[in-house]
Image: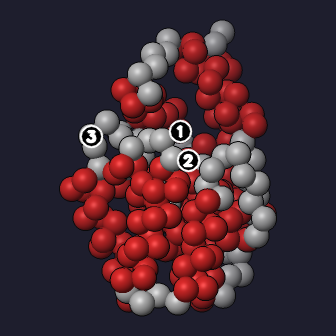
Amino acid sequence: MNNIVTKASEYVTDLLTKHLPSVYTYHNLLHTQKVVDASTEIGRNSGLTEDQFEILLLTAWFHDTGFVMGLEGHEGKSIELAEKFLKENNYPPEKIELIKNTISATEQAIKPVDILEMIIRDSDIAYIGMDRFYERTFLLKHEWEIARDKKYTEDEWIKSNLEFLTKAEFYTSYAKSRYEEGKQKNITFLKSLLK
């Protein structure tokens, strides 16, 4: 791993360990590490250049750092934190802009337009195509109940997850081949819980 990615991983690990409010039981260091792992796997299987791969990993490390300042607008706060760190480390301005754009693409309402945006989106939701998906969603349920002050019955939570999984799509051909079958299994499992 190159120097700037190593520095970023150390900075983000320290930031999330020391400053992330404990309410974030899902959007925490473990989630960030899982997104970095998925980005590494998808990126290595998507024909990226070394420059693109570096930008992808920096994006993955910073994409949810804004949660240290709260839930609302966390993507924008993540961009601010990434920009500040990268400028302090004399990172090229044109690459900083690419990272900012790629972090923006993690917003669900935004449709990814290039390979980096597609990979970060796929990496952020890769868990929906994995075993133990349902266990992980309970961390998110707990987080939302506290951070958003919203309570869910088990059926409401299952239906909410079903709606999300049904709409969620993978963008890269690698993520489709790697996670789509698992996503369909998880949809089937969720439906079985409602019967």
Position of residue 65 measured from the top left corner of the image (x, y, whole percent): 41, 58
Q: Name the residue type under label 3.
A: Ser
Q: Name the residue type under label 2.
A: Tyr
Q: Residue at x 35, y 55 (%)?
A: 29
Q: Could one spot residue 180 in this view of the protein?
A: no
Q: Residue at x 49, y 16 (%)?
A: 152
Residue on which disc 1 sits: 133
Q: Is residue 107 above or below residue 57?
A: above
**Badge number at residue 127:** 2
Please identify the quarter of the rendering in which residue 186 is found: top right
Disc 3: CA contacts within 10 A as few (<14), some (14-19) or many (>=20): few
Position of residue 179 measured from the top left corner of the image (x, y, whole percent): 67, 52
Q: Residue at x 60, y 43 (%)?
A: 128
Say if mark 1 contacts mark 2, CB within 8 Å. Answer: yes
Please identify the quarter of the rendering in which residue 176 is found: bottom right
Q: Name the residue type under label 1.
A: Phe
Q: Earlier in the sequence, mark 3 or mark 1?
A: 3
Q: Could one spot residue 161 in this view of the protein?
A: yes
Q: Is residue 11 above or below residue 20?
A: below
Q: Disc 1 on helix, strand or loop?
A: helix
Position of residue 163 measured from the top left corner of the image (x, y, whole percent): 70, 28
Q: Is residue 163 left or right of residue 100?
A: right
Q: Is residue 60 left or right of residue 46?
A: left
Which one is closest to the eye, mark 3 or mark 1?
3
Q: Disc 2 on helix, strand or loop?
A: helix
Residue on which disc 3 sits: 22
Q: Is residue 96 above or below residue 168?
A: below
Disc 1: CA contacts within 10 A as few (<14), some (14-19) or many (>=20): some
